[in-house]
Amino acid sequence: MIDTKRRRLLYGAMTATALAMAAVLPGRAMAQETVKLAAAGPMTGPSAETGQRMKAGIELAVEEINASGGVGGKTLVVDFYDDEGKPEGAAAVAQRIASDSEVIGVIGHINSSATMAALPIYKRAGLTEVSGNSSAWKVTHMGFDNIFRVIINDQGQAPVVIQQLVEVEGRKKIAIIYENSDYGKGALESATETAHALGAEIVAAETYQPAVDRDFAAQLTKIMAASPDALFLVGQYGEGGAIFNQAYRLGLTTDGSVLKAGFDGLRQGPFIDLAGADAVEGLLIFASFNSLSDAPKTAEFREKTMRLFGHPPTEQEAHNYDVTYLYKAAIEAGATKETMSEVMRTMNMEGVSGHLQFDENGDVKGKEMVIFAVKNGEFVPYVK
């Protein structure tokens, strides 16, 4: 996250300025000098790492924006809310956000099930939501016109995984273990369709309850009995680390004959430590953000995160940094709370995570997946 001392100085300066304004300006004048967004994600709980990195990306964007004149000359303020990564938490948070008349847009949520729980509430309140990380196909196909996302949806992600496993890696017997959520179910469906179309077989499909299950021996034993040559995990870093650790100890992936694959939710700081480096050696990670790209904006952002956070940018940091700048561009193009969705549909800009433009459903257009691999306990670009 942004260095604590620097953040205190920044917010202290902002607070001092706000207090000075309050002393000389009547009533709501101070509010008129700010632009407020709300951001919601799992700041605590099993997915807290993703929420905290989301927050770090947003805070970095806010600091930069305010240091360079704000949004149309106004100070950008973002209030953060903890949905714990749960639908019920998201619905409660959405009600609180909707009750704040100063909020003109929402960043988040991370978990697809959380976004889907909150979205109807935002719609009723006239709020636009732009998500950096909710990838379930259904998110943008619920009939709402106030949702956008900068991550490739599951129907654009899971088929790429299967195509790589089958057409490039030569795997024909694929096992899938997936979290019991809209995200997990959507990925399973599109992965299964793609596998069948390519002449491969899904020999096992086992599910688990995210944030609840800790012992995966039953699922992994069934998968072992199916003799797969690839194991595709659809889930987050917490359960993912435990699953790959247990798979290794059970002998499923010990000899390297079963190729392991997963999405970018696994590419978080604690994941390799949770799993054990040997258990995830050779694991392929499919991401919608190339943190090692030489594109100028990405390279500059990578230098910032290395300097400020001590690591290359994660998907959560990059995507939500971009979402913050999307709101800035939309507001400066004339968007209000009431017209935000209409203006967001016209956005066409380069972000640190790639090109940012939306289709008629609110899905990002033109982004492509990239592949990383775990080698000697590190995430590196994948070379066949």
Image (cartoon, helix red, strand yellow):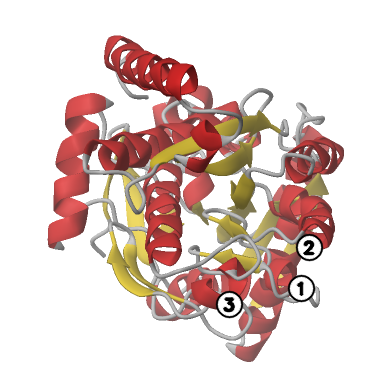
Q: Dividing the picture into quarters, in which one does residue 92 lie?
A: top right
Q: Are marks 2 and 3 in contact (CB under 8 Å)?
A: no
Q: Position of residue 258 (x, y in %)?
A: 52, 54
At 46% from the left edge and 57% from the top edge, which residue is drawn?
Answer: 327
Q: Dividing the picture into quarters, in which one does residue 53 lie?
A: top left
Q: Position of residue 325 (x, y in %)?
A: 37, 54
Instruction: Name the secondary structure under disc 2.
Output: helix
Q: Report how far apart the C-alphas of labels 1 and 3 lie in the structure.
A: 13 Å
Q: Nearer the viewer, residue 191 or 155?
A: 155
Instruction: Name the secondary structure under disc 3.
Output: helix
Residue that numbered label 3 is attached to:
342
Which label sits in the foreground, 2 or 1?
Answer: 2
Mark 2 or mark 1: whose residue is earlier in sequence:
2
Residue that numbered label 2 is attached to:
123
Q: Report how far apart the C-alphas of labels 2 and 3 lie in the structure.
A: 13 Å
User: 267 left or right of 40?
Assistant: left
Residue that numbered label 1 is attached to:
144
